[in-house]
Amino acid sequence: MPRVTIALILALALAGCAAPRPKVEGFRDAGAGLYSNAVLDPARIAGDWVQVAAFAAPNAAACAPGRVSLAPAAGGYDADVALCLPPGRAEFRGRAEMPVPGRITLSGADPQGVGEPWWIVWVDVDYRTMAIATPSGRFGFILNRDGRLPQDRLTAAREVFDWGGYDLTKLRLLGG
């Protein structure tokens, strides 16, 4: 056998011995592009939001709409969060920061849960609806200033999630 063939067989055999990559249970293809909204005005996201949609497994229990309240504070926000996220209700009360435009971190929150960095992937021009994604795809959700999400803004948020590799068949509207 030529040396090149033997080397190729050995390389493939060694590659087969490598530890498999851990599977992340999530809702997006990690190979798809994902970008946060770097041009948003951080002051305009302050206030009260209602969670109107979230990604969930098909067999997940029903979950009531959540809420996010962001009050301006020096260098960030005071956050009060109660969201419907996999595997259920997630709550946080404390400091939220935006280290770079469009990316929110919840100081001290579980980094494998609600404390995973939130990327604002879309906000409508009037700051009435906001789509939040995570690079891992473990969760994603849509916030609205009130519980009524018009079809045009739902369509826009869905398109952004779709572009970011999220499985839209797992996006659930919450509440009425």
Image (cartoon, helix red, strand yellow):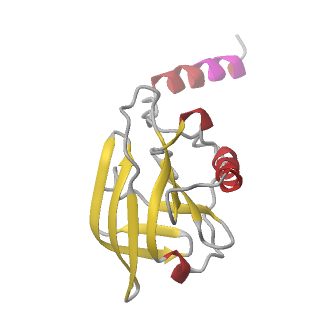
Of residues 30 and 169, which is closer to you in this image?
169
Query: In the rendered view of the protein, which quadrant contains the N terminus?
Result: top right
Q: Position of residue 61 (x, y in %)?
A: 35, 32
Q: Position of residue 70 (x, y in %)?
A: 40, 74
Residue at (59, 55) in percent of width and height = 149
Q: Is residue 5 magenta?
A: yes
Q: Position of residue 121 (x, y in %)?
A: 61, 60
- Give the side of residue 121 with respect to residue 54, left or right: right
Of residues 111 and 61, which is closer to you in this image?
61
Q: Position of residue 165 (x, y in %)?
A: 63, 43
Of residues 132 and 155, which is closer to you in this image?
155
Residue at (46, 46) in percent of width and height = 139
From which residue to which does the magenta span run? 4-9
Which residue in the rendered view is the most extreme toward the top?
Answer: 1
**Does the image show residue 109?**
no
Identify whether 78 is placed above or below 52: below
**Does the image show residue 71?**
yes
Residue 93's quadrant in the figure? Answer: bottom left
Q: How many marks?
A: 0
Q: Is residue 164 magenta?
A: no
- Give the side of residue 45 with respect to residue 25, left or right: right
Residue at (53, 19) in percent of width and height = 13
Identify whether 107 is placed above or below 35: below
